[in-house]
Image (spheres, rainbow, N blue to C red):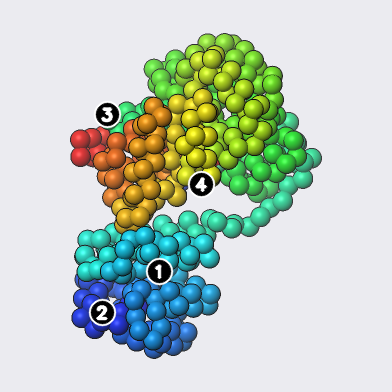
Amino acid sequence: MVINRILIVDDSSVQCHHAVQLARTVLPSAETVFFTAPKLALKDLRAQPVDVVLVDLEMPDMDGVELISHIVNEKLAKALVIVSAKPPSLIASVGVMAESQGMPVLGSLQKPIDADILSTTLNGFGDRLIAAKNVSPLKLEFSPVQLMEGISQSQFFSYYQPKVALQDMTLSGVEALARWQHPEHGLLSPYYFIERMEKGGLIDALTLQLLDQSLAIKQHWNAMGLSFELSINLSPTSLSNTGFTDWVYDHVQVFGIAPSEITFEVTENDLLGDVAKSIQTLARLRLKGFNIAIDDYGTGFANAEQLSRIPATILKLDRSMIHGVASKSQLEKVLKSTVDLANDLGMSTVAEGVELEQDLLIVKAFGIEYVQGFIFARPLPHDDLWDWSQTKLPALKDRYFST
Ligand code: C2E
Ligand code: CA
Ligand code: CA
């Protein structure tokens, strides 16, 4: 997805021309138009919507916040870049406002704009639009009977996404991510079935079926000399199921796999529900030697005190805290303080959803230990993992080791 037309609004003609020149250098093939009067910019946008608007926050007669709300409400652009000399926290909150209404914000830039930063910001355009589209794909609705049929006909299986240790660029683990090979609709992502299964009381059946499959695959990988940890996502119902711990413990024994090679991921918010039961199950799993990770951290409301009560050893930092961190200084502060918190609690850290090289550099500089993201690998079918570890991983190591 490319940027064909970009519009720049800044009431200072010097700053405006500076931005226009940079944009034309960075994106020579795009048409760049500019306005020093926001009202004229709005008129032009209404006549011809653009791909990206670069908007200054402080302008007389109509400020940037007002202009942005028109752009967002009337869908006059596909994405925004916010520019200002104001403190990063103010810029960030305007960004959050636009994003919460579905308008991707590629970045917020401090004035004067720097060519490199503008270039990386605009380069995020394609990815962000694809991500935004994924937010509300066509909703296929499946009934509990259809879901149960899928389970009984073994139509579910997992893809495996590598998790890489930054210290030495080795494969430290994989996360099993459920997929449905639907006879009519093809390969479906968890979006189409996990929540429905949770509501229909079917999720435990799926979890146990997928866990057995993954353990058999893990046994096979171990035999090939690929030894790394396997992460499994748990729904809250599994945590309130008192028989769960014994069930998994028996099953890993059957496959000859040590509990320390398995990590269970639970989301922060799930742990705020039936806390006592959940913590009991997690504590029992820990006692048996399994690892526990808190998933999607940063999307929920757990505070440090609540975190410290959960017997988890790994904190997985959600993509929303990682993606674009290199161009959003407010996000960088949030990330830094979260890493400090994890360190204080003695938890290891995993950055999820790393897609961009500049974000990876920040993740690394902050001492985050593991990365799971498209920059290294997408979720893969199990029989592609060996190939990935033999060809792609060495190339990634050449590129990113000690940079
Ligand atoms: P999750 O546990 O947070 O898993 C990570 C999700 O982020 C996966 O989506 C993965 O494909 C995606 N992802 C990884 N790296 C990147 C990246 O760099 N960029 C972007 N944009 N995305 C990235 P997926 O496979 O669609 O899974 C969605 C969610 O479904 C999972 O989120 C998890 O909450 C749930 N899920 C998946 N499998 C299971 C399962 O077996 N049981 C349960 N209870 N939930 C599952
Ligand atoms: Ca997960
Ligand atoms: Ca996650």
Quadrant of res 376: top left
Q: Where is residue 305 in the image (x, y as percent from the top left)?
A: 49, 34
- State whether residue 120 is above or below residue 174: below
Residue 169: x percent and y percent? 29, 31
Disc 2 + disc 1, Cβ < 8 Å: no
Mark 3 or mark 2, earlier in chain: 2
- Gap in angstroms between the C-alphas marked 4 and 2: 36 Å
Q: Are marks 4 and 2 in contact (CB under 8 Å)?
A: no
Residue at image x 41%, y 29%? 345
Residue behind mark 4:
299
The secondary element bearing badge 4 is classed as loop
- Indicate the secondary structure of the residue bearing disc 2: helix
Q: What residue type is labelled 1?
A: Leu
Residue 179, position as x, y percentages in the image:
59, 39
Q: SS at mark 1?
A: strand
Measured in 3D between alpha carbons, the distance from the residue under mark 1 to the one under mark 3, in whole angstroms, is: 37 Å
Name the residue: 53% across, 55% down. 134
The answer as to whether callout 2 falls within 8 Å of ligand 1 is: no
For disc 2, the marked residue is 16
Foreground label between 4 and 3:
4
Residue holding disc 1: 80
Going by the numbered disc 4, the residue's amino acid type is Thr
Mark 1 or 3, closer to the camera: 1
Q: Mark 3 points at which residue?
A: 168
